[in-house]
Image (cartoon, grey):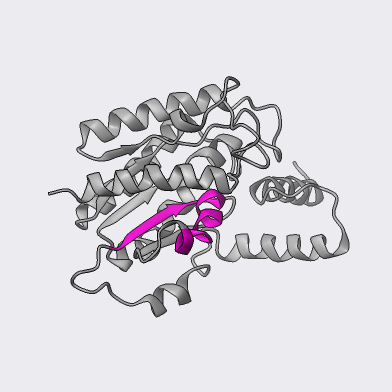
Amino acid sequence: MISRRLALAVVSGLLLTAVNLPAQQTPDADARQAAELQRLRTDWANLSRYREANAELGDPTPQEQRVVFMGNSITEGWARHFDELFPGKPYIGRGISGQTTPQMLVRFRQDVIDLQPAVVVILAGTNDIAGNTGPSTPEMIQGNIASMAELARANGIKVILSSILPASDYPWRPGLEPGPKIVAINAWLRDYAAANGMVYLDYHSAMVDDQLGLPEELAYDGVHPTEAGFRIMAELAEAAISEALAP
């Protein structure tokens, strides 16, 4: 029988993977890690992250064409530039660092549907490939994204399915060779969107290099975009939103 100490070590190791933290830390990092592990135990999908902001936001006005961007750290970082990249637009970022598609699905009603947007832009899947919350098959990733899309459609929200951004490796989980896996899931996203009358937003083709990754000028760590990367994404997103809102 596995010992209690060994079992705790295994669980701790899985949680470390989920929050993208190395095993050895400074004292401050140890404290942050402990707080994050506690949050994962009590609020796995991090529903608390945007709960107050959602309450303060209120309902859209009759003329407002609100757009919610659902995603992970890429969306979270991008949203800090929304005022500059989308001036005057009612665009709302609901990204959370490190999140996988099952976590997004859990919070989809609170962080998307309840905000009553006209459009949702879903960017998800790379952290699943990285194994942030455990092993995920392509079918699991596809099912979670399809479920979010179907929930949105059932509530009268137009759906934009974004390609996963290129990545030739993950700094926090090296050696997984995600590039071809991303290409395969993007092909499914494109086909699913076409079959269901949704918009496919192809960041990948506009940003990929010859290693199936992001070039240095577009990503500071091979995964998270620079300002130049976000500008490319913004132009593509605006075109996709216009397509989704077209009569």
User: In screen coordinates, is 22 left or right of 145?
Assistant: right
Can residue 178 be seen at all in this image of the molecule? yes
Q: Which residues are magenta?
A: 66-84
Q: Position of residue 148 (x, y in %)?
A: 34, 49
Is 202 in front, or is 110?
Answer: 202
Could you tell me which quadrant the N terminus lies in? Answer: top right
Q: Position of residue 192 (x, y in %)?
A: 29, 32
User: In screen coordinates, is 88 left or right of 73?
Assistant: left
- Name the residue at 44% across, 28% down: 205
The total of numbered circles placed on residues is 0
- Name the residue at 62% across, 40% down: 219
- Name the residue at 59% across, 50% down: 98
Can residue 124 be seen at all in this image of the molecule? no
Name the outermost residue toward the left: 247
Is 228 in front, or is 90?
Answer: 228
Q: Vertically, is 8 above or below 30?
A: above
Quick check: is 93 in the magenta stretch? no
Q: Vertically, is 129 above or below 245?
A: above
User: In screen coordinates, is 51 left or right of 228?
Assistant: left
Quick check: is 71 in the magenta stretch? yes
Name the outermost residue toward the bottom: 56
Snapshot quadrant of residue 233: top left
Snapshot quadrant of residue 33: bottom right
- Name the residue at 37% across, 38% down: 143
Is 44 in front, or is 25?
Answer: 25
Q: Position of residue 13 (x, y in %)?
A: 73, 46
